[in-house]
Image: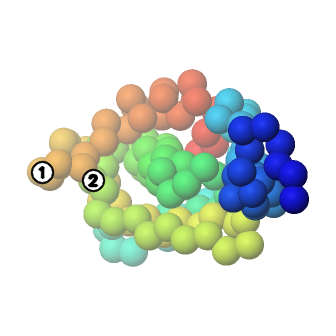
Amino acid sequence: MRQAAGITPVALVMLGSLSACDAPEPANSPFAPTYEGVTTTLLDGDLVQFNVAMRGARGPTDVEDYAECAAAQYTLIRGFGFARHLRTNVYEEGGLWRGDAVYTISPALPRGVRTIDAEVVVASCVENGIPMV
């Protein structure tokens, strides 16, 4: 068997196997999510649960951001200025990303490291095109 100059049979096999791989998405593909909605449940006084759903998320962080935007807007609607993040569970199934987040809301900055200033977060959400409650 005659081989092409500089290409070994092993290299040909490797090149053939690479062509069968799926091409990765371009790194600069546009982010165009579809926000499917928010369900808000007041659990107890200042404890609130936010269930969000979206398609086209790049990962869990996009879902967490959506939930945080909902929490910030809800906080302002209730007449408070701050919220503290307690937890967010994110999962994806069939292209639909869901998040289940729980926050406490309060009129003053609560203790903890994961607090948000609702007005600041709402402004960021508007700037980034993330819908809220």
Vertical side of 39 occupied by 81: above or below: above
**Amino acid type shown at disc 1:** Arg
Residue sitting at x 43%, y 44%:
72
Discs 2, 1 touching: Cβ within 8 Å: yes
Closer to the N terminus: mark 2 or mark 1? 2
User: Could you say where residue 59 lies in the image, as x and y percent from the top left?
Assistant: 55, 54
- Cα separation, mark 2 vs mark 1, equals 8 Å
Q: In percent of the image, x 59 and y 62: which residue is there?
A: 52
Amino acid found under the numbered disc labelled 2: Arg
- Res. 109 image quadrant: top left
Which structural element holds mark 2?
Answer: strand
Which residue is outermost to the left? 111
Circle 1 residue:
111
Residue at which label 2 appears:
84
- Of the pair 17 and 22, the residue shown nearer to us: 17
Q: Label 2 crowding class (10 Å Cα cut-off): few <14, some 14-19, many 20+?
A: many
Which residue is depicted at the point 75% across and 57% down?
9
